[in-house]
Amino acid sequence: MAPEIATTEPHVGRGRMDLLRFATAGSVDDGKSTLIGRLLLDSKAIFEDQLEAVEATSHSKGYDYTDLALLTDGLRSEREQGITIDVAYRYFATPSRKFIIADTPGHIQYTRNMVTGASTADLGLVLVDARHGLTEQSRRHAVLLSLLRVPHLVLAINKMDLVDWSEQVYEQIHDEFTQFATKLAIPDLEVIPISALKGDNVVTRSENTPWYHGPTLMHHLEHVHVASDRDLVDTRFPVQYVVRPKSEEFHDYRGYAGQIAGGVLKPGDEVVVLPSGMTSTIAGIDLADQEVSEAFPPMSVTVRLADDVDVSRGDMIARVKNAPKPSQDIDAMVCWMTNAPLRPRQKLAIKHTTRSGRVMVKEIQYRLDVNTLHRDTHDVAEKGLGLNEIGRVQLRTTVPLLCDPYSKNRTTGSFILIDEATGVTVGAGMINSGN
Amino acid sequence: MSQDKPRTHADYRLSQLDQLEAESIHIFREVAAEFEKPVLMFSGGKDSIVMLRLAQKAFYPAKVPFPLLQVDTGFDFPEVLACRDRWVDRLSAKLVIASVEQAIADGIVIDDGKTTRNRLQIGTLLNAIEENGYTAAFGGGRRDEEKARAKERVYSHRDDFGQWDPKNQRPELWSLYNGRIHEGEHMRIFPLSNWTELDIWHYIGREQIDIPSIYFAHQRRVFRRDGMWFSESDYNPCRAGEEVVTKQVRFRTVGDLTLTGCLESEADTIDKIIDEIAIARVTERGATRGDDKFSEAAMEDRKKEGYF
């Protein structure tokens, strides 16, 4: 059976398209790869040669349908095992938006991939199989998305064709999830009944669900409002690089380059440089060879200051009356990503915004059970935090961090931990508070 | 923009192209700040030229603080080399050329007559990186190009042998890139990871970026081989039964001229190219690259060995 292609016009994407990054999560059999294949196919992001390769593979495996999941299974080892083992990024666009999908595997041992995919997502898409309802895994995915402060969540109830398009099944899963979500930080939730295989309510509205009055998945992805998710109040500009041309023409030029993490910067603003506490005024903001009148997240700009103050990489420019307090004692949720467990007294390298230093683990308070949200303190001091476990950890840093709670700012509230011997990223942290 | 009305979130919207630009500039600056000896791998193709434009923006008004490294197959299009020279001039950049011919002569790679130049580039490139002690090498790879690339990190770690280990990649979270490497290792950096082919063209159009003329439709003497049109050239003699004809063509990718085919096209402006791509139904590599056709996993294998 050749997959049917919905009739959206090919789009050229000129003008002011915006961007939505979303992360998908689901168990191996929930049909996640099929759904992504469907979104790519129906938005015409799949090309003939890709579709032909997938049709040929499906045929050689003896399937009587085109396995859309094959479109997204990238590495040969995955194709052999028939599972997705790592975060893969996919792209498609409609006339109003470009989409970046972080496609993450669903199985238990790959929590770290889910956390990785969710870290940059504006929206999380959780798939459940209508026949099985909410599983431990779907609850875990919702918890992780909430922990990573992904502001929008879609629960897609898939395989509705296999439960005779039952409104009752939909309502039951909807209610159960809403009940569960009251314990989480999920500001925006949409529950959509779909069939990824047949395409119902993915791009086109299904005639099989007359009782459903919400949007199709694609309509929701295209229209969900993400512009207000950014913090435009609290100015945070981590200095990344000092631009000093030392040329004839720009002899005295000294600019501080970075990507704005929060707030709006304007020439004339009184600012403070942290951690030194020196104050100055913004003399100008450059975006390459153009001067701009204001700058906001996530713009990458170069800021010039009116005074000759000492500023270097790792410093932060903030407002005089609204600046983070430099902190060396950090209380954070840490997701551990390597086999050898994280233990009290352990020393690691840390990277927070553009600042690097070392940390010592003072205490692991508890392990968070991501299925029940239960705080497990049993053995945590002795056994530490294992691979794919998430726990509340107290850290002491060698350099003060210029941080905010992760719930306020995902850029200034996050950090990674690096094993100093291997150089590998072994932990991801979300700051509760700093002192 | 009026200063009278209170501003709302809607006033602070950044188009997706501006967001991609901001992300790429952030990556360039991060690498320049954290790596001792970065280099930009320059192929002469549109993606590496977009990288140059972004690097130029990232450090303006200072010069781009790293050299360009080009692997010269000896089979490069003259139009591409001309464009390269214009860019080197424009940026007052340092250009380092690693020649496949020279690598063959020095016994660094072995030309057995069966291996394509594309494949010989791998050894030549790795040798140039090692000899010069480069610790980070920017590449123009995009994740939308190919299935193996879809899983590659922005910072892609390479071991002593320049190999990529896809099952053992470092987690990459937020915009916090981990640049730690050991002596002898290096990092491949992909600042265009999240760009698509259409994004690249929109950006080239918006920024009026100078690219090689062969991307635009022009008259060329070509012959048909393996279902693709190839340019007539001394390097790529016609075989029996192949006939040279003149066609209106353009190239969709730029590489070794013995391997890179062209398409019949009337698209002689950026806007026409964008229209052509928007309705194209074949990926850019699938359409005109002989090197990716050998096996379904061709790209994955070459990447593991240390390809771009």
Image (tube, rainbow, N blue to C red):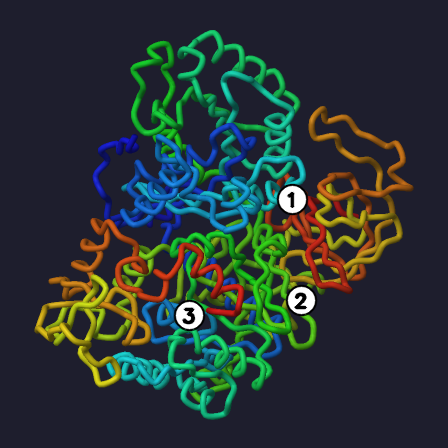
Q: Give the x, y percent position of residue B167.
A: 60, 54
What chain is tagged by disc 1? A
The residue to which callout 3 is attached is: B57
Does A374 sit above or below residue B93? above
Identify the residue at image location x=30%, y=39%. Answer: A43
Q: Give the x, y percent position of residue A217.
A: 39, 28
Name the outermost residue toward the top.
A168
Q: Which mark is residue B180?
A: 2
Q: Residues within 10 Å of mark 3 (few under 14, many from 20)?
A: many
Q: Amino acid at mark 3?
A: Lys
Name the outermost residue toward the left.
B246
Q: Amino acid at mark 1?
A: Arg
Q: Give the x, y percent position of residue A296.
A: 47, 52
Secondary structure under tag 3 reads: helix
Q: Residues within 10 Å of mark 2 (few under 14, many from 20)?
A: many
Q: CA distance from mark 1 to mark 3?
A: 34 Å
Left or right, B247 with respect to A179, comes to left
Q: Amino acid at mark 2?
A: Arg
Q: Which mark is residue A112?
A: 1
Left or right, A160 with respect to B198, comes to right
Left or right, A352 with respect to B108, comes to right
Q: Nearer the viewer, mark 1 or mark 3?
A: 1
Left or right, A242 with respect to B103, comes to right
Query: Is label 3 in contact with label 2 (beta carbons under 8 Å)?
Result: no
Q: Is residue A138 visible?
A: yes
What chain is tagged by disc 3? B
Q: Nearer the viewer, residue B97 or A255?
A: B97
Secondary structure under tag 2 reads: loop
Identify the residue at image location x=50%, y=56%. Answer: A265
